[in-house]
Amino acid sequence: MFGSVLIVCVGNICRSPMGEGLARQMFPGARVASAGLSALVGRPADPIAVEIVRERGIDISAHRAQPLTETLVRDFELVLTMESWQTDDVERLAPASRGRVFRLGHWTDFEIRDPYAQPRDAFERAFEGIERGLINMKAALKIP
């Protein structure tokens, strides 16, 4: 079992906060956080994201966006991104992280598109992708 996971997207207000909340629920013993490559620093999670995860018993209302830094990457055992280009950006920012940065869709080859400023169904699709990615990762890494 891994002890810590960092979930990364762009603004840290839609996908990664939903992922952080879901990962906290799925991996209760792990330290979980999220950050954004171009974080909207200090902003709360998008209201649609908050609503979608609340409907699943997860509270991310206290979330505030934070920027991804090399130090933050170094402090986590596993770093999960939403899209391939984000994995590349994380590895450029923190070259020593290679081998522990994965796209959530890595195990079954899919990307999780950004729902920012889109209707609720785009957020639902993003959440479903995040959930599928975490389930596939858990199975692939044989995490109980």
Image (cartoon, rainbow, N blue to C red):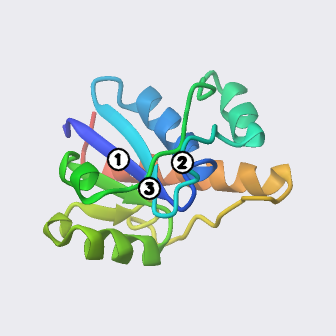
Residue 31 vs residue 113: left or right?
Answer: left
Residue denoted by label 1: 6
> Nearer the observer, disc 2 or disc 1?
2
- The residue type indicated by label 3 comes to Val
**Along the line of sight, which residue is nearer the eye, 129 or 68?**
68
- The residue type indicated by label 1 comes to Leu
Q: Residue at x 28, y 76 (%)?
A: 92
Q: Earlier in the sequence, mark 2 or mark 1?
A: 1
Q: Residue at x 28, y 24 (%)?
A: 29
Instruction: Say which quarter of the image contains residue 56.
Output: top right
- The residue type indicated by label 2 comes to Val
> For the residue labelled by badge 3, is the local secondary structure a helix, a strand or a loop?
strand
Q: Are marks 3 and 2 in contact (CB under 8 Å)?
A: no
> For the residue labelled by badge 2, is the local secondary structure a helix, a strand or a loop?
loop
**Along the line of sight, which residue is nearer the eye, 41 or 68?**
41
Q: Is residue 26 above or below residue 86?
A: above
- Where residue 8 is drawn, which disc sits there? 3
> For the residue labelled by badge 1, is the local secondary structure a helix, a strand or a loop?
strand
Instruction: Say which quarter of the image contains residue 95.
Output: bottom left
Q: Position of residue 86 (x, y in %)?
A: 43, 71
